[in-house]
Amino acid sequence: MLKRTIYIGNPAYLKYKDLRLEILDAISKEVKGSVPIEDIAIVVLDSYQITISHQVINALQENNVAILSCNEQHLPLGLMLPLAGHVEHSERLKVQINVSEPLRKQLWKQTVESKISQQMLLLKKLKKNFSPMEEYLASVKSGDTSNMEGVAAKYYWEQLFDDFTRDRYGDAPNNLLNFGYAVLRSIVARAIVSSGMHPTLGIFHRNKYNAYCLADDVMEPYRPYVDEVVYHIMENSEIGTSESLSKENKAQILQIATRDVLILQKTRPLMVAVSTTTSSLYQCFLGEQRVIRYPTIY
């Protein structure tokens, strides 16, 4: 069964009852909604007036639910995951730690190639000029030592949005992209934990201050799915300020978890495809497989 993403943007009290997450009005304590916890994948908390009990947190963690908390700008700030999401966690962590440098470089090459391919396919789908992306894709080396990822990204953003500069703190479409990437990161981090690996130990990203290096690696080819949603939001509205991060736009972006993607020549919800990717990554770590399974935009 496909897991659900629960977004809570109003004052609320979250209660655990009969294996379900109950959402109560913060003042009247009237029950506004109830969801079986085993059906939940991600809970997004986007109000400073949400009260959540320790019992709820424990129940969510026991079911490998990612808890995403947002800041005053309504952008995801913190991510909570269980320490161990797989029965072989200790064994798999040892395998992950001992991955050789040549293998890391090969896996990063595959990841960059997949990301550039996804960007190229999105430009093609949106009837933009994608021709230079073919050359960038063919030029990726082991470890991406020539930084084709950055070269391709520069061209990609120029084609996707007019007069656009990518900024972690800017107005639309940056704030929409940042929200979407943070949700995507939580989806990927959750899948990594479910596959028995640790999201901190990346194959390319190694910033000592980053607790989600591997999630940032694996999510790269999935970013264009967020880009596509944000592109259509921008095309169908006249927004241009931070007000663009409305509940309606957030709801659209949160749907990426369940949108259909093509992976292994089959259509699967993105959340399922990410699990396929992380599972194949671990098989590569073991030496049982040579290729990471990434999706294809269609």
Image (cartoon, grey):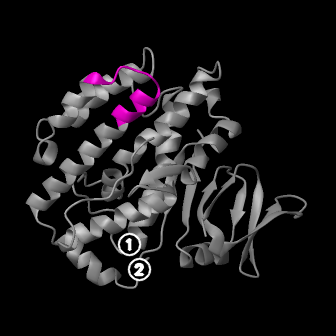
Tell me the kind of residue under disc 2: His
In the picture, the quarter occupied by the N terminus is: bottom right
Percent x, y for residue 69? 57, 54
Provide the residue designation for mark 2: 86
Horizontal arrangement in the rendering, residue 261 relative to residue 291 (left or right): right
Percent x, y for residue 84? 41, 78
Dot 2 falls on a residue whose secondary structure is loop
What secondary structure do most residues of the magenta stretch adopt? helix
Question: At x 47% / y 42%, what residue is drawn?
Answer: 225
Question: At x 32% / y 58%, what residue is drawn?
Answer: 293
User: Residue 120 lies in magenta, yes or no?
Assistant: yes
User: Contact (CB < 8 A) between labels 1 and 2?
Assistant: yes
- Mark identifier at residue 195: 1
Region rendered in magenta: 119-131
Front residue of 223 and 94: 223
Among the 4 quarters of the image, the one containing residue 145: top left
Question: At x 8% / y 59%, what residue is drawn?
Answer: 102
Percent x, y for residue 156? 34, 26
Pointer 2 local density, CA inside 10 Å: few below 14, some 14–19, many at least 20: some
User: Residue 19 lies in magenta, yes or no?
Assistant: no
Among the 4 quarters of the image, the one containing residue 19: bottom right
In the rendered image of this protein, does residue 55 appear above or below residue 111? below
In the rendered image of this protein, does residue 50 appear above or below residue 231? below
- Dot placed on the residue nearer the N-terminal end, 1 or 2: 2
In the displayed image of the protein, which residue is found farthest to the front?
Answer: 265
What is the tally of numbered marks visible in this picture?
2
Horizontal arrangement in the rendering, residue 232 relative to residue 127 (left or right): right
- Mark identifier at residue 158: none
Horizontal arrangement in the rendering, residue 133 relative to residue 12 (left or right): left
Tell me the kind of residue under disc 1: Ser
Percent x, y for residue 216? 34, 51
